[in-house]
């Protein structure tokens, strides 16, 4: 199938061409203003993760000082359980992903002393080689990774698997050229990247694909300027 016939987004002629930094900051600072808001109530299971995304974005934009640091620290303490792990919010069970997000928030705010670090470290008592072997078992013929052995390759899962193999010293399990080709093929004519073949591009998957290519040292395989145009066009005026 030719690239021209693939599903793609259409960029309107009047799309933004500059980064609307102030609007992004304004949008992020509104998160959680109304606890009774439907979307807020329905995203309990993502609360710590969402706070990490906001914190990292505000830090990158140079506006971390506008966040309520004491309130963030109080929230993190409430989310840590006796096991050492973190739950997304009170009333939920702890999870590795929430724990990762919580630790990353503490690092950005330079407040690691505010959490039970010894409790978190107990999570590291695992067989790293076996974990890496499981990740390798999810490797597909196209170079990508699925959620389990035999599952379809998916950009979000690829980033998770590539990142895991990189930090555990098992990146040699990957055929960087084959996977790099699969990832580079995710870029469409609009400049955006999709998560799987025949899916529309979006900013989220553009991040997963781009980050994976960076780890593999294949980031130059995509058109940087077209991707910038796509991402800027995704901003809401």
Image (cartoon, rainbow, N blue to C red):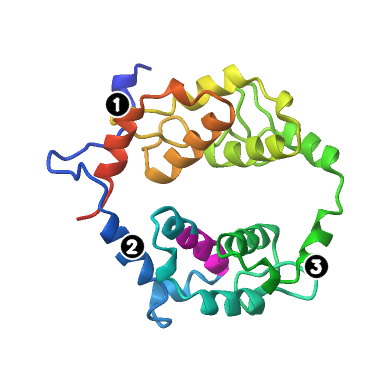
Residue 35: x and y, percent?
Answer: 43, 81
- Which type of secondary structure does the marked residue at label 3 adopt? helix
Q: Identify the image quadrant of the C terminus.
A: bottom left
Residue 204: x and y, percent?
Answer: 43, 46
| Front position among marks 3 and 1 | 3
Quick one: label 2, few (<14), some, or many (20+) residues within 10 Å? some
Q: Are marks 1 and 2 in contact (CB under 8 Å)?
A: no
Q: Main secondary structure of the magenta part?
A: helix
Q: Is residue 235 above or below residue 167?
A: below
Q: Splitting the image into 4 quarters, where does residue 18 fall?
A: top left
According to the picture, the residue beneath numbered tag 2 turns out to be 25
In the picture provided, is 27 more to the left or to the right than 90? left
Q: Earlier in the sequence, mark 1 or mark 2?
A: 2
Q: Identify the image quadrant of the N terminus.
A: top left
Quick one: label 1, few (<14), some, or many (20+) residues within 10 Å? some
Q: Which mark is residue 39?
A: none
Quick one: label 3, few (<14), some, or many (20+) residues within 10 Å? some
- Which type of secondary structure does the marked residue at label 2 adopt? helix
According to the picture, the residue beneath numbered tag 3 turns out to be 119
Q: Earlier in the sequence, mark 3 or mark 2?
A: 2
Q: Which mark is residue 189?
A: 1
| Front position among marks 1 and 2 | 2
Q: Splitting the image into 4 quarters, where does residue 190 fall?
A: top left
- Which type of secondary structure does the marked residue at label 1 adopt? loop
Name the residue: 57% across, 67% down: 48
Asked if residue 51 can be seen in this view, the reply is yes
In the picture provided, is 31 more to the left or to the right than 20? right
Give, as a single range, the part of the protein colored magenta: 45-55
Q: Earlier in the sequence, mark 3 or mark 1?
A: 3
Residue 212: x and y, percent?
Answer: 55, 34
Name the residue: 18% across, 43% down: 15
């Amino acid at each position: 199938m030719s690239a021209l016939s693939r599903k793609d987004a259409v960029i309107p002629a009047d799309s933004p061409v500059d980064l609307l930094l102030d609007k992004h900051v304004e949008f992020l600072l509104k998160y959680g203003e109304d606890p009774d808001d439907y979307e807020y109530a329905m995203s309990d299971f993502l609360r710590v993760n969402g706070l990490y995304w906001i914190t990292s974005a505000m830090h990158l934009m140079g506006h971390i000082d506008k966040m309520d640091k004491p309130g963030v620290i109080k929230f993190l303490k409430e989310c840590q359980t006796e096991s050492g792990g973190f739950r997304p919010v009170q009333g939920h069970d702890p999870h590795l992903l929430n724990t990762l997000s919580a630790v990353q928030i503490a690092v950005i705010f330079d407040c690691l002393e505010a959490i039970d670090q010894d409790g978190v470290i107990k999570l590291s008592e695992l067989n790293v080689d076996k974990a890496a072997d499981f990740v390798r078992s999810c490797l597909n013929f196209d170079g990508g990774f699925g959620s389990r052995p035999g599952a379809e390759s998916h950009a979000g899962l690829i980033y998770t698997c590539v990142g895991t193999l990189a930090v555990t010293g098992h990146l040699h399990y990957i055929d960087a050229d084959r996977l790099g080709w699969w990832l580079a093929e995710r870029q469409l004519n609009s400049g955006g990247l999709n998560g799987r073949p025949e899916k529309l591009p979006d900013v989220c998957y553009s991040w997963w694909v781009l980050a994976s290519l960076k780890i593999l040292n294949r980031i130059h395989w995509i058109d940087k300027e077209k991707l910038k145009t796509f991402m800027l066009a995704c901003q809401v005026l």
